[in-house]
Amino acid sequence: PPPPPPPPPAPPGAKNVLLLVADDLRPNLHLGYDKSFMQTPNMDKLAASSLVFTRAYVQQQVCSPSRNSFMSGRRPDQTKTWNFIDDFRGIGANWTSMPQYFKNHGYQVYGTGKLYHPNKPANNDLPLSWTDYSNGEDLANKSCNNGHAQYEQHTNASIGQGSEWKRIVACEENDGEYLLTAAAIRFLVQATNGSDPRPFFLGMGHHRPHLPYVGVACCPPPLLRPSSGTVQCESIPSRVLVTCTHTHTLTHSHTHASDRSPTAVLSRYTPTHTLIHTRTALYGCMRITHIKQQYERFAQMHHAQSQSGRLCS
């Protein structure tokens, strides 16, 4: 059969699109969400020129169903994806995904990292959804630990060290989050170097701050001192069904033996020393390194490209 016709050109004045996705990231940004203790200057610049949503929610409490939902524009009861086994292509082989829509309408479309849950759909839906897709493995520094980040070996189960949180001690440039950011920056430069006049859609999906929380040894966050013997975790709204919540192994391993019921999990009490260390690691992951650092790297490049006149988004 003859090859399919090329997609029509993008409409005049079409804007570039950036889709930035993080896994389990709370809305803790300085400008966008009034969290003055967060130091995110480049993300603040992005938020200042963006529409910030304050009531946006996931479709389901785990990765694959929720991502299949927002990437396909259909609810989980339509995609029939409620787990990590199925994906929407199983029943919607001819459905048009969000990035695929842009690809079919004259855009160059690039993706990196965790946008779909890995390989759900197969091959991250390449080539249907993307012009190109990369996690940046080819950008690893092979001369440093054979291309891998080096993590501290010390563990301390009583404070979650080594399981719920850990530190990178060397070769940070080979960590997966750093590499996928580098791949996104490479796509951004490629899309704006003038070789392809089409507007672009670029998605960058980070795996963090999903557990384990990862920071770097050189920049540990300050350890907040507890004011009482226990700290009560935030509870979810009373009208939310227990089946709509998700309890990670962290929840189970750090609740008291008498608080194992589903309802107790929602208002659990965690030993203070564990909770403080884990929360400290979370903010270290978000504020000092990785998510903050990688988003700042990308946002800084995006801002520079905008200032140079190469971006119109």
Image (cartoon, grey):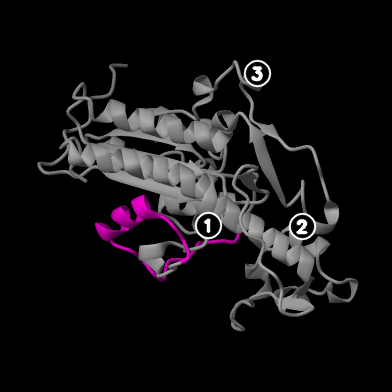
Q: Amino acid at mark 1?
A: Leu
Which quadrant would the N terminus be assigned to in this image?
top left
Q: Given this view, does label 3 or label 1 mark the residue nearer the observer?
A: 3
Place residue 112 in its image quadrant: top left
Determine which of the numbered discs, if any, sits on residue 25 in the image.
1
Residue drawn at 28 percent across, 24 percent down? 4
Q: Residues within 10 Å of mark 3 (few under 14, many from 20)?
A: few
Where's residue 60, x and y in %? 56, 61
Q: Which tag, 3 or 2, sits closer to the chain's start?
A: 3
Q: Main structural element of the magenta stretch: helix, strand or loop? A: loop
Residue drawn at 60 percent across, 16 percent down? 143
Q: Amino acid at mark 2?
A: Thr
Report if residue 95 lies within the magenta region. Answer: no
Give the alpha-carbon distance from disc 2 to disc 1, as whole Å. Answer: 18 Å
Kind of element beneath mark 3: helix
Residue drawn at 27 percent across, 58 percent down? 50
Most extreme residue toward the bottom is 238
Give the answer, above or below, for where 183 lies relative to 41: above
Question: In the rendered structure, which segment of residues is drawn in magenta?
Answer: 37-61
Q: Is residue 19 visible?
A: yes
Left or right of 43, for residue 113: right
Give the alpha-carbon distance from disc 3 to disc 2, as whole Å. Answer: 31 Å
Kind of element beneath mark 1: loop
Give the alpha-carbon distance from disc 3 to disc 1, as whole Å. Answer: 30 Å
Report if residue 51 lies within the magenta region. Answer: yes
Q: Residues within 10 Å of mark 2 (few under 14, many from 20)?
A: few
Where's residue 167, x and y in %? 67, 43
> Which residue position holds label 3?
146
Left or right of 239, for residue 184: left
> Which residue position holds label 2?
249
Check if mark 3's residue and mark 1's residue have beta carbons within 8 Å. no
Q: Residues within 10 Å of mark 1 (few under 14, many from 20)?
A: some
